[in-house]
Amino acid sequence: MNEYGLESPRAQELIAAARAMGPDLIARRAECKAGRRVPDATVEDFHKAGFFKILQPEQWGGYAMDPQVFYMVGFEVARFCPSSAWILGVIAVHNWQLAVFDDQAAQDVWADDPSVLISSSYAPVGKVKVVDGGFRLSGRWSFSSGSEHCKWAFLGAVVPTPEAPFDMANYRTFLVPMEDYQIVDNWDVVGLQGTGSHDIVVDDVFVPEHRTHKSMDGFLCDNPGNAVNTAPLYRMPFMQVFVRAVCTASLGACEGALQAFVDVAKTRRVGPNFMKDDPSARSLAAEARADIEEMKLTMVRNFDEMMDKCRAGEPIPVEDRVRYRYDSAIVADRCLALSSRMLKAAGSGGVRQGSELLDYHLDILCSQAHVANHSAPFANNLGGVMFGEENHDYAV
């Protein structure tokens, strides 16, 4: 048995712990939504359960589990509270990313406390000046989910060169401590309210070379951190690990929406009959169940295939990476289509204030706004590769 895999005792314990949190997550949903942040008690529960350790290197007390373990935990959390699952996904995945930085970066963050968390905003909006030993960084980044729970931030920017002032081939992630940035409280949205995805402002701070990571290294699966973190997990392509952090909450929310739809159908009357006796309602519930299971199994299969290659020391074929990327990007679209149909079918039982079905639908709607969940360019790239063209996306 693979001790890091989905069938391992530790993985099953982690998934069971996520399910067991259901009552508390549900009880805190109103607080999460009204406060526009996941309650501290929930983040503490995630720490105690070991969720932030799932992708963290073992040398720092982590578990270095296969990615599908982490995302099955996230799926379970999202069934009860999509906002909590969202910040778990996008924060805990950073413990994987820090492992591919130069090891000195991990020393900077975790030397005194390996439980320290990192938020992020990867948009390439930073202004960079090359200086001795590193860079000067300035900018304002939006959508840094869970930032109030974190002491560091990953921020995106392109390093200019005389030949190419803005070339995404020179994109880097910059690691910045909280004393060097300001959080601007401006998260006011219709769904995923609890993610607290505020803006981050940086004003001309020094970032040493070792606290940066080149996106091209992540694409080539040859990172500075691999000198220390030699487990196959850290040979995964960066984007393949990260993108599931922003679609798995959608999938778990769709599961929650399905349960809410079933609850409405059992109690709502349409004329003299219960909605649950309507053949179209039954058909929709069956379709949603099948689609959710298919998306879960696709995620597991894709990570199984990628981890098999990493364990064998073999490259993951680019054409497969392009397909895996599309499989992830389309999840939010498919979940939104399902939740929209369930909301419509529920009629007045779904649109009243306080409707669980409506809340799940709006969470999925907001998750779809993340650029990694915009499926069209990834469909275009996959279709082009299928028709014999070269891959044109280095975020796969």
Image (spheres, rainbow, N blue to C red):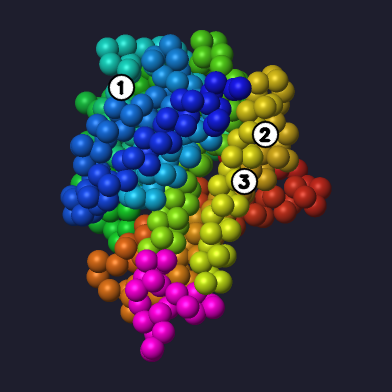
How far apart in space, not on screen, are marks 3 and 1 (Cα)?
31 Å
Q: How far from the left and from the top, in percent, is residue 25?
A: 28, 46
Q: How far from the left and from the top, in percent, is residue 97?
A: 46, 27
Q: Which amino acid does label 1 sit on?
A: Ser
Q: How far from the left and from the top, in percent, is residue 108?
A: 33, 14
As helix, strand or loop, the secondary structure at mark 1 comes to loop
Q: Which amino acid does label 3 sit on?
A: Thr
For image coordinates 52% across by 14% down, the residue present is 229
How far apart in space, not on screen, are marks 1 and 2 (Cα)?
30 Å
Q: What residue type is labelled 2?
A: Glu
Tell me which segment is drawn in magenta. 261-281
As helix, strand or loop, the secondary structure at mark 2 comes to helix
Can you say whether 71 is above or below 295 in the image?
Answer: above
Can you say whether 22 is above or below 118 in the image?
Answer: below
Name the residue tied to disc 2: 305
Name the residue tied to disc 3: 298
